[in-house]
Amino acid sequence: MIKLRFSRRVFLAGATALSVLTCGSTAALAAAPADTIVIAKPADPQSLDPAVTMDNNDWTITYPVYQRLMKYETEDGKGLTSVTGDLAESWEASEDGLTWTFKLRDGQKFDDGSAVDAEAVKFSFDRLFRIGQGPSEALPGGVEVTVVDPMTVSFKLSETYAPFLYALANNGAAIVNPKVAEQSDDDGKAYLASNTAGSGAYRLASWERGQTVTLEPNPHYGGDKPAIDKMRIIIIGEASARRLQLEAGDVDIAEALPEDQLEALEGKDGIAVQNYPSLRVTYLYMNNQKAPLDNPDVRRAISYAVDYEGLIAGILNGNGKQMHGPIPDGMWGRDESVIQYSRDIDKAKELLANADAEGAEITFLYSDADPNWEPIAIATQANLAEIGLNLKLEKLANATMRERFDTGDFGMATGNWTPDFADPYMFTSYWFDSDRHGLAGNRSWYTNAQVDELLREAALSSDQAEREKLYAEVQKFVTDEAAYVYLFQKDYRIAMRDNVEGFVFNPMLLDIYNIAGMSK
Amino acid sequence: MLFLALVVIGVSMITFAISHLIPGDPAMLVAGDRATPEIVERIREDMGLNKPLPEQYWIYLKGIVSGDLGTSLRTRRPVTEDLKLYFPATLELAFVALVLATAVGVPLGVASAVWRDKPIDHLVRALAVTGISTPAFWLGLLLIVLFYGDLGLLPGGGRIDPDITRPPTVTGFLLIDALLAGDLTAFTSAVRHIILPALTLGFVHLGVVARQIRSAMMEELQQDYVRTARANGLSRRNVIFREALPNALIPSVTVLGLALGDLLYGAVLTETVFAWPGMGAYVVNSIQALDFPAVMGFTVVVSFAYVLVNLAVDLLYMVIDPRIRSVN
């Protein structure tokens, strides 16, 4: 028999190593320090260049780092969709609405101490258009920016653009330090992808890829010194791990937790689960060009067959509300007098019989970009089977699915939409203008010359009351003709430690934190 | 070397073909949600996607030779930069896991073979089956809940405490870099962070190693030379460890070599659970974003590493088996 003996030396060495490894535990597991806000995110940022990124996950960093001419207003701790001046002290539009002149606020500085002036504004917008990627889309083409004097800048539009001021509060309209052009010869693109050069309250201190991103105060910031000295983002891919770290107090805010984790966290000591009404809507595209969906009666039948309440109760745990037309609750211009479809199987069957489309087969695309899409697809398939429509589900990689939207090679599909700027334009011109068929926004390939005309008129007008009237008209058309299936507006839910104070939720700024105003 | 070059060309060609033939336009992905066709077209030109496929491949192949794997569409950085950052983390985790699996698996396998059909053998076999059939994902979460959540003994994820200044990067292996810098605080933190993920990853392979050693040992122990050695008066202990085990290790080295390859590919789930900043998360995100330069870079580098490991295994054979040495 072999005698296996532990020598005393080995044992002692093992015991010592173990105690060294575990004795540091109290320090490592202590709560996040009081001057630091720690946010757990599921994914690393991709690009920090405001002229390139279209992703809220990146905006968490860029938004507090840069300032814009306009910002969203806050009233009694509530984020509004209306805008006011940020870098702009005052502004005025010419009679014809084509020239906008902004006077800049004094004393605003970039993080290297240089002043934010009209040159910087001109540089930022010229650069945005030169790069010409997604973020430039929020502004109309052909904008000319002119330096009037060091602190005055004017924008000349080629045609009036009603949402102009709102678009200036968007992440892409960030004012960038012109010195970035010296950092890399591609207009500073390579540099800004992983560095920041803004005049906001914070600046990037470090980015350990795939691990942590740390922001520190901008020493030259023109506003009040923030209470929070550091914002640290920790990348934790797995939701349960994010939740555990929140419970242990290592993390102050845990993003993107699924409903079941949030339910489990509710009522736990030290944790606050917050619910906010958001402008993020989930809807179904119906390809208006493709039989049988080219027949409005079939689209109406589908709109009557969907079990909206069931979806909201089953998938969102009740944390959401049914849409009423395309414009969500909380956005101006919404008209609640239009029809809101609700489940009525008899009516749906009748409409389908009129259209002679019973038994038709429709392809239905979805991806796992949103975990809710699969249950929605399955529920819709069951709902439509009841009225005799046969949905053929196709689960695709998100990128592949998006390409099919662009070519119109689909019947129905799931989609989410969040506005880039606080204007009903985002939910109307994008969704229904026949110039935007496909990925550009009109995913249902809806075409109606009258609606096109109304939309273009509304986009040119700067009279809000008149625009409301025009949008009300549009809403009548697109609900009556059931251009999309308007599903629901999902609440934005986020779990935080309950000692985090001062967070202002703004439906326009998902995943963005007003850290300069927060404390704990 | 020739073989190596052939493998790299073959692998790059296949991945290139696959990633370019699957439907999905990366330019559209880069352009964002609401881009107009003009913007998408401009990006396509910027990325060279409008060139004919063979030309694109030729450009890519020329790049590989000069160590340029292209620019990631997602992170917009050179793929080599990204891999330099993430690959060492994965390799470090895989190595530590392999060492754990071997250090525990070999003695268990030997014990199991020596005390065949005794309680310890049943226990080891049960453990091996459990190891092989336990999803790393589940085991990882369980370990986090226990050691981080309930006991508070070990950190819940990451590679090092974010408050600790990292030692300067020399090798990219945090454990080694910390030692090189003589930074004990960083080293301890790195060790504490690697324990749970390495256990999780290693546990799966522990079963494979134990079973392999067990069957090889049982075979060796029935050989004539073992009986002869015993008859010549060698102690049982000497026979097992000096005579039988070295022979049993030869086939096991192959298994271990393959296991390292598996560990590199298989670290994905473990890395996700433990927020380990390795290639797993990087490549998963890249695949979802149709970031083909990144996916191809990953495939080429891992295949390269795989071939190298196999080469090392062959060389190791010569060291442990004199017969192979003499034939050569």
Image (cartoon, grey):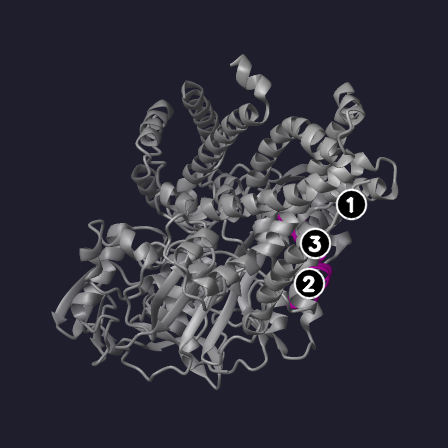
* Residue position for label 3: A306
The chain identifier of the residue carrying mark 1 reads A
Magenta stretch encompasses residue A311: yes
The chain identifier of the residue carrying mark 3 reads A
Query: How far apart in space, not on screen, are marks 2 and 3 (Cα)?
Result: 40 Å
Q: Position of residue A281 (x, y in %)?
A: 56, 61
- State the SS at label 1: loop
Q: Are marks 1 and 3 on the same chain?
A: yes
Q: Label for residue B62?
A: none
Tell me the crowding category of disc 1: few under 14, some 14 to 19, or many 20 or more residues within 10 angstroms, Cα based.
few
Tell me the crowding category of disc 3: few under 14, some 14 to 19, or many 20 or more residues within 10 angstroms, Cα based.
many
In the displayed structure, B227 sits above or below B162; it is: above
> Which kind of residue does numbered mark 1 sit on?
Lys
> Which kind of residue does numbered mark 2 sit on?
Val
Q: Nearer the viewer, residue A176 or A327?
A: A176
* Residue position for label 2: B145
**Which residue is most to the right?**
B118
